[in-house]
Amino acid sequence: MTSRRMRELAHDIETFAGRAPFTAADAADRGISPDRLAHAVRVGELHRITRGNYALRDEPMDLARHHLGLLTQRGIPGVVGCTRAADSWGVATFGSVGAVSAAPLTILVPPGSEVRRGTRYGVRLRVADIDPVDIRIVDGVPMTGPMRTGLDIARDTGRCRPSALVPLSSGVRAELAWALGVEGPASAREVTDCLHGDARVRIELLASLADMVGRVNGYGMKWVRRVLADVEPLLETALEGLAWSVITATDLPRPQPQVWIRGASGKRYRADFLIAGVVVLEADGAVKYSSLTPWQEKKRQHDLEAAGYWVVRCTWEELLRRPHEVIDRVRLALERATLAASWRDVHGLR
């Protein structure tokens, strides 16, 4: 079926069903044959929800509503969770080698539910004990909240330090974004400013996470508990989370994330990390610098270096494949900063 015919099929379906699920009988009444539906499913244009029931693709909430409705008819409460919830909340997912690929729509049901576990019709049913306080309603669909979603992602993918630490930190941060009622990339500054403005907010968030970890039992908690003390809601991106997981696993001074510092020109900049007050660690690729040209970034670095800071840059590839190189550069920068400070003291230049 050509792309033109596929568009025509989608238009025909929207004409009688809108974006809601429909049956094969509904389609047949409009002259759409089972063969056309089957082909559309094979090429990914349609979801086959259950036998004889379909929905246009890219309508995850409609798909969720349909299956949650079927469960409700059987007296089984369901909650959307895992990667689908992570997409909704903006919780970063991270495996041992990078971002986690998309997974089927996952619906969580209580223990003891008489359901067939596993994946069918593009939907995965899993058993999980979800506390009502960890559930939010999104577009009429019950879904695990941001913090619980981050915890579940960490349990699923936690096979190393960053794969647990990144989703946990992102989930805590997304929980605050939800509480503030902000969303999208523009919310990053507002969430960070809130965390900087009131230290109690961060303390309460981390206390809530610790309480949640204490009442969640089952699989995947090994790495969650290992990294719990290093969860940091100030991390704005998965790349920053990866850098944080690398540096905090060493004996280097603990970095300060998202710190405002001043260059020699007097201009203020926000550093990804400030280490020992003198070394600036920049995770190249951070969203907030995407609008800067290479020349602007170079001027920024020169301004900071003129003010006495030592700037170290790192990339995804280095942090994933050669983290020791990043650590060595930070150590060298700290050593040089110490020597420079000693020289200024000796010559009375402070």
Image (cartoon, rainbow, N blue to C red):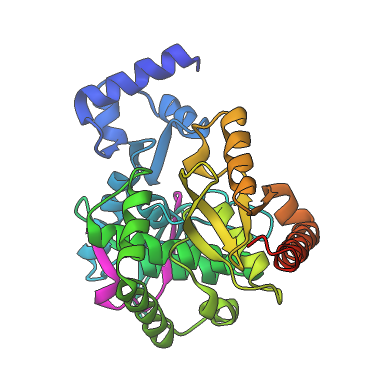
Q: Nearer the viewer, residue 81 or 14?
A: 81
Q: Quadrant of residue 280?
A: bottom right
Q: Looking at this rendering, what residue extends furthest in the top direction?
A: 4
- Residue 34 highlighted magenta (yes or no): no
Q: Is residue 248 above or below residue 257?
A: below
Q: Nearer the viewer, residue 52 or 69?
A: 69
Left or right, 229 with respect to 55, comes to right
How many marks can you see? 0
Task: Report x, y in % for residue 308.
Answer: 63, 54
Left or right, 339 with respect to 252, comes to right
Q: Check the picture and name the quadrant holding the C terminus.
A: bottom right
Left or right, 22 with respect to 150, comes to left
Q: Looking at this rendering, what residue extends furthest in the bottom direction?
A: 214
Q: Evaluate whether residue 65 shows in this view.
A: yes
The residue drawn where x is 60% and y is 72% is 254
Q: Is residue 312 above or below residue 179?
A: above
The residue drawn where x is 35% and y is 71% is 109
Q: Is residue 243 above or below residue 47?
A: below
Q: Nearer the viewer, residue 230 or 264?
A: 264
Task: Report x, y in % for residue 337.
Answer: 72, 62
Q: Quadrant of residue 273?
A: bottom right
Stretch of the chain drawn in magenta: 121-137
Task: Report x, y in % for residue 300.
Answer: 57, 39
Q: Looking at this rendering, what residue extends furthest in the front direction?
A: 348
Task: Report x, y in % for residue 202.
Answer: 36, 72
Q: Evaluate whether residue 31 shows in this view.
A: no
Q: Quadrant of residue 324?
A: bottom right
The residue drawn where x is 41% and y is 50% is 87
- Residue 136 highlighted magenta (yes or no): yes
Q: Nearer the viewer, residue 250 or 10?
A: 250
